[in-house]
Image (tube, rainbow, N blue to C red):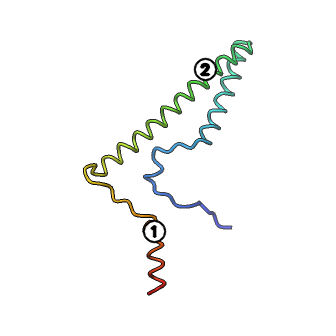
Amino acid sequence: MGGHSGPQQDPERLIGQMYFPQFLVGMSATILVVLGWTYADTGSLWQALGWTFVAALVLQVGYFIAVLLIIYGRASSAAKTTDSSLPAKVPGPFERDGIIHTFLSRLL
């Protein structure tokens, strides 16, 4: 049973990626810590729930800003790498999927 590390990915693509499941687990753990800590400190369930709501709101706003920054960073890096004065050459679906090349290789 050899170790399978999964598909190889380009290291440059991994920079600036956020995975929602990881964020969700981390956010849930943080909220539970805030809930327990606030309840232990104040002794009031309502205050603990209030501060937990504030913590969840701050985490969501932070995640939203981080996603916007990642999107903005990708858009600005893509704009730097392409010349906007030239029209983009987009391959057709047959060229992109290799259908024509496969068909020609079978004929010849």
Look at the numbered disc 1 and give the secondary structure of its residue.
Answer: helix
Q: Is residue 58 left or right of residue 78?
A: right
Marks 1,2: beta carbons within 8 A: no
Q: Residue at x 52, y 29 (%)?
A: 62
Q: Crowding at label 2, few (<14), some or many (≥20) Cα neighbours within 10 Å?
A: some
Image quarter hosting the N terminus? bottom right
Residue 16 image position (x, y, % from top left): 46, 44
Q: Which image quadrant is residue 51 in? A: top right
Q: Which mark is residue 94?
A: 1
| Mark number, residue 54 | 2
Res 76 → quadrant: top left
Q: From the viewer's perspective, is residue 88 above or below residue 80?
A: below
How busy is the neighbourhood of tag 1: few (under 14 within 10 Å), some, or many (20 plus)?
Answer: few
Nearer to me, 14 or 93: 93
Residues 17 and 87: in front is 87
Could you say whether the residue bearing mark 2 is in a helix, strand or loop?
helix
Name the kind of residue labelled 1 in the image: Phe
Residue ID at (73%, 12%): 44
| Residue 71: image location, x then y, percent | 44, 41
Query: Residue 78's spot in the image, x, y percent?
Result: 36, 48
Determine the CA span between mark 1 and mark 2. Answer: 52 Å
The circle on residue 9 is: none
Residue farthest to the bottom?
Answer: 108
Does label 1 or label 2 sit earlier along the sequence? 2
Foreground label between 1 and 2 = 1
Between 68 and 106, the residue placed more toward the observer is 106
Q: Amino acid at mark 2?
A: Val
- In the displayed structure, 103 sits above or below 9; it is below
